Amino acid sequence: QLRQNYYAKTCPNVENIVRAAVNKKFSQTFVTVPATIRLFFHDCFVQGCDASIIIASSGGNTAEKDHPDNLSLAGDGFDTVIKAKEAVDAVPSCKNKVSCADILAMATRDVIALAGGPSYAVELGRLDGLSSKASSVNGKLPQPSFNLNRLNSLFAANGLTQTDMIALSAAHTVGFSHCSKFSKRIYSFSKQNAVDPTLNKAYATQLQQMCPRNVNPLIAINMDPNTPRKFDNVYYKNLQQGKGLFTSDQVLFTDPRSKPTVNAWATSSQAFNKAFITAITKLGRVGVKTGKNGNIRKNCAAFN
Ligand code: HEM
Ligand SMILES: [Ca+2]
Ligand SMILES: [Ca+2]
């Protein structure tokens, strides 16, 4: 039921308004790019793309954003949506007409383009969800230790294929990770191997230098060691060289079921871009709320 130009009658300029707000945020910090993309993913995988992730905890309710799996979401993603919402609501005819969920979908599209990724038409018409509970996050998000079967089954539960999953994983072509998310791979992988043998040797040494044992837990490193600020298919070239940061990244190359796709997209950014647009469009359709199941929030961080 989503469609392009959903706001043609109510707020015809909405995409330009959001883009201007996102551009402004981007000029202040690049972090808006990875932070917004990841926010969209974590929103859609828990209760659908309904901005449930943006709700702040209050009173008796511990919201999704305070679940351990969401604590590393960067504040600049939330701020991007809140700033864009303010810009939309500053136009009298648009006030309280555009959902936070749709603003997040538009902002995600815009930051990807700003970082050099593919441009695409964004589908709109999502309502904002009416519930956000930390407990509902349990088991809904992938862990960096996941193998291909676990990745596939979690994505399949959201209507996404293995191909979609491989395409969406390329979001790790921008942004940061804290050392704790992969320290097992560089220090205590298994009885036989302290270092994960699927890791490129030189890259493993670099990671050990950037993430010494007992490193400050606030330290975060680039997930793409080559083009951390470009949304590109270098992600797949890195996997071919053993430079996938998480097990869940590297497994896409080591598992023979996904390797051919990695190789195809490492050689063709055109083929990757096409698959990515398909996949992120499908991601944007997950669990969309309509009718009585949602509303348009006045404040993205609180229920009306
Ligand atoms: C396939 C399974 C996935 C796993 C296991 C996974 C896991 C992670 C982890 C552990 C981090 C580092 C968080 C931190 O330490 O701060 C991260 C970062 C990130 N993830 Fe994923 N992720 C997956 C898929 C995705 C998808 C599908 C997207 C979006 C389409 C995405 C977008 C991002 C982005 C942009 C960052 C960087 C965030 C930042 O710099 O603030 N990830 N992911
Ligand atoms: Ca959600
Ligand atoms: Ca990159």
Image (cartoon, rainbow, N blue to C red):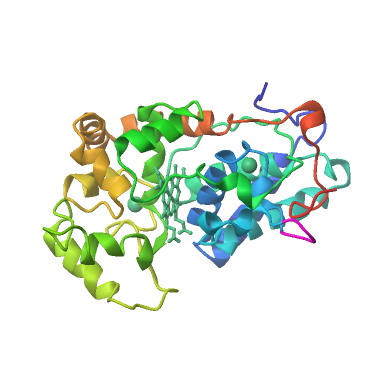
Left or right? Give the position of 96 relative to 129: right
- The residue drawn where x is 26% and y is 51% is 244
x, y percent for residue 131: 73, 43
Q: Residue furthest right?
A: 92
Task: Inspect the magenta stretch and tell me whether residue 266 lies in it.
Answer: no
- The residue drawn where x is 82% and y is 39% is 97
Number of labels in the image equals 0
x, y percent for residue 51: 67, 45
**Residue 225 to residue 233: above or below:** below
- The residue drawn where x is 23% and y is 71% is 208
Q: Nearer the viewer, residue 55 or 134?
A: 134
Residue 253 occupies which quadrant of the picture?
top left
Q: Residue furthest front?
A: 191
x, y percent for residue 192: 11, 58
Q: Nearer the viewer, residue 138 or 4?
A: 138
- The residue drawn where x is 77% and y is 41% is 130
Left or right? Give the position of 8 relative to 235: right
Task: Inspect the magenta stretch and tell me whether residue 59 lies in it.
Answer: yes
Left or right? Give the position of 269 relative to 12: left
Residue 234 makes an appearance in the image: no
User: What's the magenta region?
Assistant: 57-61
Q: Nearer the viewer, residue 99 or 178?
A: 178
Which secondary structure class fits the magenta region best? loop
Q: Quadrant of the N terminus?
A: top right
x, y percent for residue 13: 74, 39
Residue 202 makes an appearance in the image: yes
